[in-house]
Amino acid sequence: MSDSGRDRPPAPHPLPIPVADNHTHLDLSRDGDGPPDVQAVIDAATAVGVPHMVQIGCDLPSARFTVEVIESYAALLGGVALHPNEAPRLHESGELDSARREIELLASHPRIRVIGETGLDYFRTGTEGVAAQQDSFRWHIDLAKRTGKVLQIHDRDAHEDVLRILAEEGAPERTVLHCFSGDITMARECVERGYFLSFAGTVTFKNATGLRNALAVTPTENLLVETDAPYLTPAPHRGATNAPYLVPLTVRAMAAVLSTDVPSLCTALAANSEMLYGPW
Ligand SMILES: [Zn+2]
């Protein structure tokens, strides 16, 4: 594995029951690191009880990479989409229609089980991009329904519009809010609608009391765990590069918030992933 000298957090204590990392980016690197060595990432994760990962490709190069890598590694399933920050750019440059055709083609691969990440990002994209984002979100909702795949949603500072558009379009049968960032009220609304809430390392952050409160009211039947690596590294390693082998830190933090034991939570997380994505 390439190592630029950044401190690599030590491997956490292995989980007693294997779980899946429901959302990771194996093609992305941070701050001049080379792209990760996929086999080494899988080996490190498997050694701590995270033998399964969903690789998410959210622009065309990354979606093509995703299809290649899921064909090579049994530990990986994939998701493809045009990210909410990518859609307005493609719209501007006149490349949106051809990009959609290619995503739809890549999505037909049997090991692509996710349409995502799509959704809304009002943090990175300004008001000029909102119409294109919303149109793109609706298109991906429809694609997930037509293909029968799981929808994974990116929601940054756009909770109300995400819920509104899902209600207007009719959400796919299996819908996941990736890196859930809402409050208690939103968590309850999502659970009522049958959505899944995927928690990332953010739930371990010191200032994330609102997020932990949202987790505390979410039934384990609606829960997933993810890294969103290489970002959102869980405490106490915030700032280091994230990778799937750090999932146990987030799982243990979630168990503490839920006042449940780690094996029971792992069993639920594993069952939920399998129910959503099917066998690896
Ligand atoms: Zn992501």
Image (cartoon, helix red, strand yellow):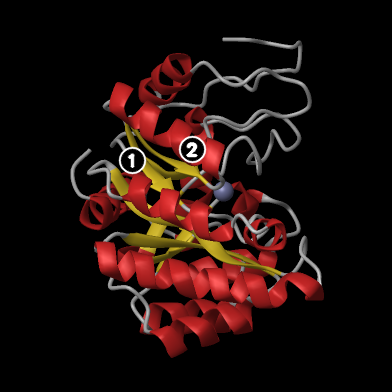
Question: Contact, CB < 8 Å: mark 2 with mark 1?
Answer: yes
Q: Secondary structure at mark 1?
A: loop
Q: Nearer the viewer, residue 92 or 41?
A: 92
Horizontal placement of 34 versus 191: left or right?
right
Q: Can see residue 174?
A: no
Find residue 276 and report its horizontal and vertical position in percent: 26, 57
Locate residue 231: give its quadrant: top right
Looking at the image, can residue 54 be seen?
yes
Q: Label 2 amino acid?
A: Val
Residue 247 bears which disc, if any?
2
Kindly identify which residue carries mark 1. Answer: 19
Q: Position of residue 91 (x, y in %)?
A: 65, 63
Which sits earlier in the primary sequence, circle 2 or circle 1?
A: 1
In the image, residue 27 sits, relative to residue 136, either above or below, namely above
Measured along the vertical axis of the image, is residue 35 above or below residue 102? above
Q: Residue at x 74, y 12 (%)?
A: 4
Q: Give the vertical position of 8 relative to 30 (above or below).
A: above
